[in-house]
Image: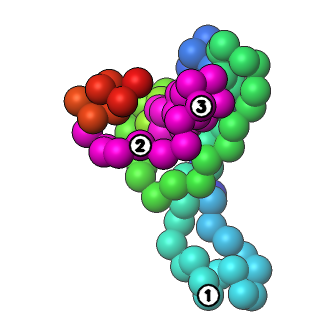
Amino acid sequence: MERRKVNRSKGASSDHTIVFTGVTTSKRCPIALRRIRNRDATTGKRYEFLINNFSLAVNTIAAIYKSPWQIELFFKWIKQNLKIKSFMGTSKNAVMTQI
C-alpha cells in the first residue's frame, strides 16, 4: 500500500505498509501491517519483520528483536560451557551467585 524511505547506511533495506489480500489471510488479519527488512551489520544476515507499530524507527524495531536473541545465546553458552543444567533463581543475583 505504501513505501517509506529508509536509511540504507544503517542497515534498513525497506519499510512497507501491507494488507493481506488472500481469502483466508484477509479474514484472519484484516488490519494493515508494517513489513520491515533489515540487515545486521555484524553478521550480514537479513531479517524481515511484520509488525503493527507504525511509530518506531526501523533500527529501533530491529534492536528490540535482536536483544532477546542475544540473551538466549548468552544462556546457551553458559549451559554448554559451565555445565549448568538449570538455574536455581531468575534474578541477576541468583544467576551470578550460581555461576
Pick the residue in front: 96 or 49. 96
Question: Looking at the image, which residue is at 55% across and 79% down?
Answer: 30
**Residue annotated with mark 1:** 27
Q: Looking at the image, is mark 1 or mark 2 nearer the viewer?
A: 2
Q: Secondary structure at mark 3?
A: loop
Magenta stretch bounds: 65-91
Q: State which tag comes first along the sequence, 1 or 3.
A: 1
The image quarter containing residue 14 is top right
Question: Looking at the image, which residue is at 48% across and 39% down?
Answer: 68
Specify the label residue 87 is tagged with.
2
Residue 38 x/y as whole percent: 65, 31
**Residue 86 makes an appearance in the image:** yes
Question: Looking at the image, which residue is at 62% across and 67% down?
Answer: 19
Within-10-Å neighbours for mark 2: few <14, some 14–19, many 20+:
few
Q: Secondary structure at mark 2?
A: loop
* Amino acid beneath label 1: Lys
Q: Quadrant of the C terminus?
A: top left
50 within the magenta span: no
**Residue annotated with mark 3:** 83
Please say if the residues under marks 1 and 2 sit with CB atoms less than 8 Å apart.
no
Q: In whole angstroms, how far apart are the C-alphas of marks 3 and 2?
A: 11 Å
* Amino acid beneath label 2: Phe
